[in-house]
Image: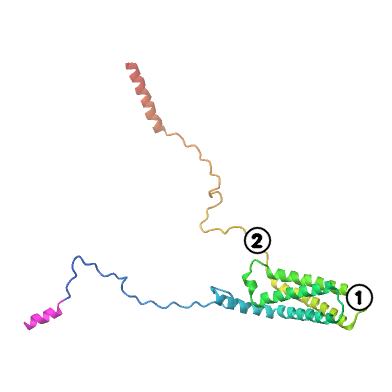
Amino acid sequence: MADKGKKGKDAAPAAPPPGAKPPDKKDEKVEEKPPEKKVEPKDEVGTRKGCRRYKWELKDSNKEFWSMGHAMVKILSLGCLIGSLIMFTGSIVHPLLTLIITMEISIFSFLFVIYTFAIHRYLAFVLWPIADLLNDLFACIFLGGAVAFAVQTRQSIPMNYLVALILIALAGFFALIDVCLQRKHFKGKKVKRHVLVPPTKEGAKEPGQGPGAAKPKEEPKPADKKAEKPKEADKGKDKGKGGKK
């Protein structure tokens, strides 16, 4: 009896009934490795999105804006223009001069905010280096013309008026320096050709094999002699039947 009890314990588990389905392997828990974090490049945006992208754009934009000297030149131009307005307060000034000075102050301030907060990185449809270059050129022309106009319209030039004109001339000079700094953006860049040509796919058809290509004319095949023989035999039978009639 003891031996039978031991055999019953050591016996294999009972086989599942014939109607039962085997357990699926998909239901078994598989140990998944944690996803590895992607290392983003420092010199490129990479796959950054949202706030991460804006932080990178803000840092890179300010680095470029200050390291190339554009920020310092714009700050000096703004300081000179604001100082000229302050010096003009104690004397009678033509309204055209104040109009030109306030216009240039607003444009320089707009560009400074655009570059500082990296807004231009999200407005890719504007060519910002060219826009800034044109602004500097027009600023030189307008400020130089304002100085010449201010000298011609006054017979006597007081001290504060003279200092204001010198500050306006300095602002135009700093804008000219910014023009020279803008040239760095265009160095080493060539005009891209064949931009509108669609890229060729792998395994593309050779010329003359596309859907719009003209198909080559097929040469006429020689008539099969075997096909002509049964026709002649049929004609002979028809003639024989006609003679019998």
Q: Label 1 is placed on what type of residue?
A: Arg
- x, y percent for residue 76: 76, 81
Q: Which residue is drawn at 16% across and 73% down?
A: 14
What residue is shown with label 1?
154
Q: Seen in the image, is 158 located left or right of residue 81?
A: right
Number of numbered callouts drawn: 2
Q: How far apart are marks 2 and 1 (CA)?
A: 55 Å
Q: Say which residue label 2 marks.
A: 193
Dot 2: within a 10 Å radius of its alpha carbon, few (fewer than 14), some, or many (20 or more) residues?
few
Which residue is at 68% across, 78% downward? 65
Q: Is residue 32 above or below residue 226?
A: below
Camera sees residue 146: yes
Position in image of residue 200 (x %, y %): 55, 58
Task: Confirm whether the magenta stretch covers residue 195.
Answer: no
Disc 1 crowd, CA 10 A, few/some/many (<14, 14-19, 20+): few
**Observer-nearest of 34 and 138:** 138
Three-letter residue code for mark 2: Arg
Quadrant of the image occupied by residue 8: bottom left
Nearer to the camera, 59 or 5: 59
Q: In this image, 165 relative to 134: left or right?
A: right
Q: Give the range drawn in magenta.
A: 1-11
Residue name at image x 67 percent, y 74 percent: 114
Q: Where is residue 185 in the image (x, y as percent from the top left)?
A: 69, 72
The percent position of residue 235, horizontal first and vertical second, equals: 38, 24
